[in-house]
Amino acid sequence: MVDLLNAIVLMGNYVIVPGLAYGSQLALGALGVTLIYSILRFSNFAHGDTMAFGAMLTILATWWFQSMGISAGPLPTALLALPIGIIGTVLFALATDRMVYRYYRKVKAANIVMMMASVGVMFVMNGVVRVVIGPGEQRFADGERFIIKAREFKEMTGLSEGLAIRTTQAITLVVTIIVVALLFWFLQRSRTGKAMRAYADNEDLALLSGINPDKVVMVAWIITATLATIAGTLYGLDKSFKPFTYFQLLLPIFAAAIVGGIGSPLGAVAGGFIIAFSEMGFTYAYKRFIGYIGPDGWVPDGLLQLISTDYKFAVSFMILVLVLLVRPTGIFKGKVL
Amino acid sequence: MRNVILFALMALAFIAAGEFQSWSFSLTILNLCLISAVMALGVNIQWGYAGIFNVGIMGFAALGGAAAVLVNAAPVPEAWAAGGVGIGASLIALLAVIGLIALIRKKLRGNLRRYATIAAVIGGYFAIREVYDPAVAAIESINPAKTGFLGGLGLPITISWAVGGLFAAGGAWVVGKVALGLRSDYLAIATLGISEIIIAVLKNEDWLTRGVKNVSTLKPDVPTAIELQQSGWFLDIASWLEADPMLASGIAVKLSYAVLFTIVLGLIMWLSERALKSPWGRMMRAIRDNRDAAEAMGKDVTKRHLQTFVIGSAVVGIAGAMLTTMDAQFTPGSYNPLRFTFLIWVMVIVGGSGNNWGAVLGGFLIWFVWIEAEIFGPMLMEFVTSGLDPASTLKASLMGSAAHLRLFLMGVILLLVLRFSPRGLIPER
């Protein structure tokens, strides 16, 4: 019995808690990708760098607050700085739409041209981020580090395995739940949200019924930039901020959006968690876990790791291929990409 | 005429770089420009001929680099003795599992087929790991500071250019089989994924290419600068030219690479031009411009796409092997998608998609700008920040990251060309 509890706690500590946090970050990222795809109809390669850009602005604002002695007590100061980052990123996104994408919408360019343009935007954002904050790693998390430490948990429960929950992990989950709830409320209930769904569903019909396409596109960018900044900041708080890792998030984020069904917000959230838990599940070494639940004294020799952590990209990729072969529309019947 | 002027201007830029910076520097850029031009040609075959959006160029270039190691590095007999059998057995096991799956897919039907496939994949995976893991451990434990890998064949490195092409072609065939025939977005993301996986394999499978420990013992086929400095005939020529032997030997090595690379570029260029003008080229353009119509005419679009994807990737693989040859070392950690994938895309778009001469010009121009921007970026930043206090931390950090301005510059160039001259510098005829 105790062994079973230990096994559960072990999984909780190494797979479930980090998986929930990582899944939330991917879900927020995938929501942005899916939104741009359904409204503007292209795959936005600049999304990872938008996240980096938003996180960078938030970090700069955090440093500014810290230098003035403002803090959020036990919570990270970055939460206070987040609105500044969001406003800056929204303005940047609207500016790129104005200067880059609007023209291609007007001439009804093929979506591959839009995609290529997003590569250009990606370069620009990459350059801006690296010039302003540098290519190195930045840590900006402050406040209380743990909600519950592994040692405290052991003392509390008397189990031999500890469960540590970092503040940033809890914050990530709470913020994601709030943001996703707000977004779904907005898309389902508000007038603009309904207009966006109509526009995504059938552009011509939406235009006929008097929906203003410029407004829909503008709102889509505002939401996407907001989500990207939040996702980027949460990821940076939880792990650390490095411009290149944000670029590499592009693959799991796209995989999440496609698994869930691109164009479906619900699918993006589900996809984010599917990708995160598959990555965690495949790269976790099950040696101790089996030691607990297996028969007495039966401890396996190897680490029992399905694949090495270095191959986590392979997990996203395998899921991508599997979805393509089994169900190209994704779980929630998105568009076929 | 316009094309001649454009290429003449490019030549002028190299002469200027030689005169005002240094000839050795100018030749280094030229060699990398030649390699970039080959890569851009490969991408142009995919994008310009068939409209395939490949974002995995980095992976195929790295496969070419790995080929250079496997062909040229000296074999390590101890490692072969320790784990050669194990690696061979895992390879056979892998083929056996693939064969088993193929058999299941062919013979069984319905749910049984699905479950049998899943069981074969899982069972096969663990069976292979059972043989593979001990073999890898055995190989990597042999003198890990110096070798720790199987080594290569010890053959001349120039052979690896062809082998690199074959490697990349094989990789492309697998990816293409899975992802082609779908919409372009999907292929883009799938290729992005496969390139990251290829890099991860090359970084972590130490028994194959030493991973991040790098292989720096590659022997080039052209004489090295030090060999030249020790040979009498070279010193004679140098003194006759009244040149410094140190400087002259460096330039001579670079020139010989330039000649080799030019031959390869010329050959590939000639073949691609022939292909583009042949009935095959016309068919490819027909498919690109109107897929449905071409399909209605009885052309097998997916098969043609696979063909171009494989050929284009092979060309990229050749370029990747050439790059590793010139560096005389293989460093998997240095492959970065911005420089190896997206920069090549900028070359193709700026040069003129669909036109081979355009792709070559784009390769030259963008690499030249990329290198020079690294030098002029800090100078520009110095100018911009000249109002700031020289001791301020802001200035120091801005100066430190000024080299990254070139990323910004590349983005702006790409966006401007896409917007105002979408057909590029040398448009398709």
Image (tube, rainbow, N blue to C red):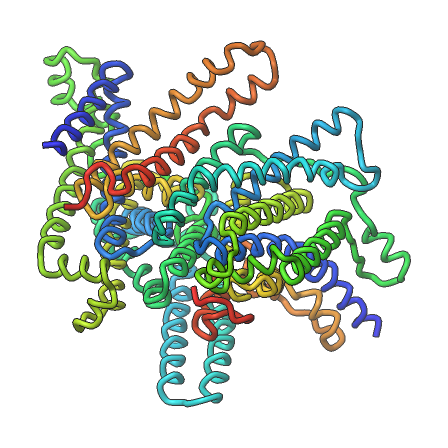
Residue under the point 46% across and 44% down: B212
What is the quadrant of residue A283 in the picture? bottom right
Residue B356 horizontal/vertical position (percent):
18, 44
Vertical order, A256 against B113 (above or below): above
Residue under the point 9% across and 53% down: B277
Residue under the point 84% across and 71% down: A2
What is the quadrant of residue A298 in the picture? bottom right
Residue B226 horizontal/vertical position (percent):
26, 25
Residue A108 in sight here: yes
Residue A282 in sight here: no
| Left or right: B40 in relation to B403 | left
Vertical order, B144 against A210 (above or below): above
Residue A303 horizontal/vertical position (percent):
62, 63
Residue A220 horizontal/vertical position (percent):
55, 50
Camera-side residue of A89 and A254:
A89
Camera-side residue of A62 and A299:
A62
| Left or right: A84 in relation to B415 | right
| Left or right: B146 in relation to A257 | left
Residue under the point 46% across and 63% down: A205
